[in-house]
Image (spheres, grey):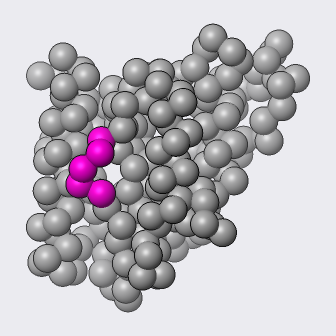
């Protein structure tokens, strides 16, 4: 099988984001046939239906990156029991205007890390609801709610705990099979 392109959406803009570290860890565990493109979302204007007539260049770039992908990986923190506004804004932009939903039919997974013991369970559930409406088939199991502790995952994505590495490898294996199922 040829290269599978994965569009990665990290919902945190923080420089030392735990979720960016988690995304890098997934990349390190993935087979070479997957290539990862971290989609930039920090430069997007707030969505307005006024865009529908003529999309801004950065919004068109976002739509093109999603359309070029074979699969999607959403790595999100939880803000106030939901998904970060910057991530929701990116989803709104790439799914519009009506009839041009760039996400439709793309297989996805939703994972996240937080310093809280609940991980990102509520944010992930909200994101899954949004993605279901957008016709995005989302991997159901395993769910990945990482309780992030100091140095669990290094900045380069190195996982410093054998149990966490084994668990995330199981997720990666399931995710790869999920993406391949839709790519064939």
Foreground pick, 117 / 100:
117
Which image quarter holds the C terminus?
Answer: top left
- Does residue 36 appear anywhere in the picture? no
Residue 115 image point, x, y percent: 46, 81
Horizontal side, residue 174 vs residue 132: left or right: left
The chief SS type of the magenta part is: loop
Residue 170 image point, x, y percent: 14, 56
Which image quarter holds the N terminus?
Answer: top left
The structure residue drawn at horizontal position 53% and vertical position 22%, both measured from the top left corner, is 102
Name above or below for residue 2 compared with residue 153: above
The quadrant where residue 51 appears: top right
Name above or below for residue 83 compared with residue 90: below
The structure residue drawn at horizontal position 47% and vertical position 25%, both measured from the top left corner, is 135
The quadrant where residue 12 appears: bottom right
The structure residue drawn at horizontal position 39% and vertical position 26%, both measured from the top left corner, is 106
Residue 181 image point, x, y percent: 19, 25
Residue reaching furthest right? Answer: 50
Q: Is residue 24 magenta?
A: no
- Does residue 159 appear anywhere in the picture? yes
Residue 98 image point, x, y percent: 69, 15
Foreground pick, 12 / 175:
175
Q: Is residue 141 magenta?
A: yes
Residue reaching furthest bottom? Answer: 150
The structure residue drawn at horizontal position 87% and vertical position 23%, both measured from the top left corner, is 50
Horizontal side, residue 30 vs residue 119: left or right: left
Give the magenta range.
139-143
Q: Please state the total of marks drawn on the protein image.
A: 0
Horizontal side, residue 38 vs residue 70: left or right: right
Horizontal side, residue 79 vs residue 27: left or right: right
């Amino acid at each position: 099988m040829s290269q599978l392109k994965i569009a990665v959406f990290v919902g945190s803009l923080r420089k030392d984001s735990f979720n960016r570290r988690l995304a890098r860890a997934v990349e390190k565990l993935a087979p070479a046939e997957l290539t990862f493109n971290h989609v930039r979302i920090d430069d997007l204007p707030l969505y307005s239906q006024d865009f529908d007539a003529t999309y801004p260049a950065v919004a068109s770039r976002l739509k093109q990156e999603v359309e070029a992908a074979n699969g999607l990986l959403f790595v999100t923190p939880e803000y106030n029991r939901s998904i970060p506004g910057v991530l929701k804004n990116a989803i709104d932009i790439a799914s519009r205007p009506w009839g041009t939903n760039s996400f439709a039919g793309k297989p996805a997974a939703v994972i996240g890390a937080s310093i809280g013991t609940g991980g990102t369970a509520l944010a992930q559930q909200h994101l899954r609801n949004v993605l279901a409406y957008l016709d995005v088939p989302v991997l159901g199991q395993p769910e990945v709610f990482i309780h992030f502790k100091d140095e669990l995952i290094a900045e380069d994505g190195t996982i410093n705990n054998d149990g966490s590495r084994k668990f995330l490898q199981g997720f990666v294996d399931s995710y790869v099979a999920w993406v391949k199922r839709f790519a064939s």
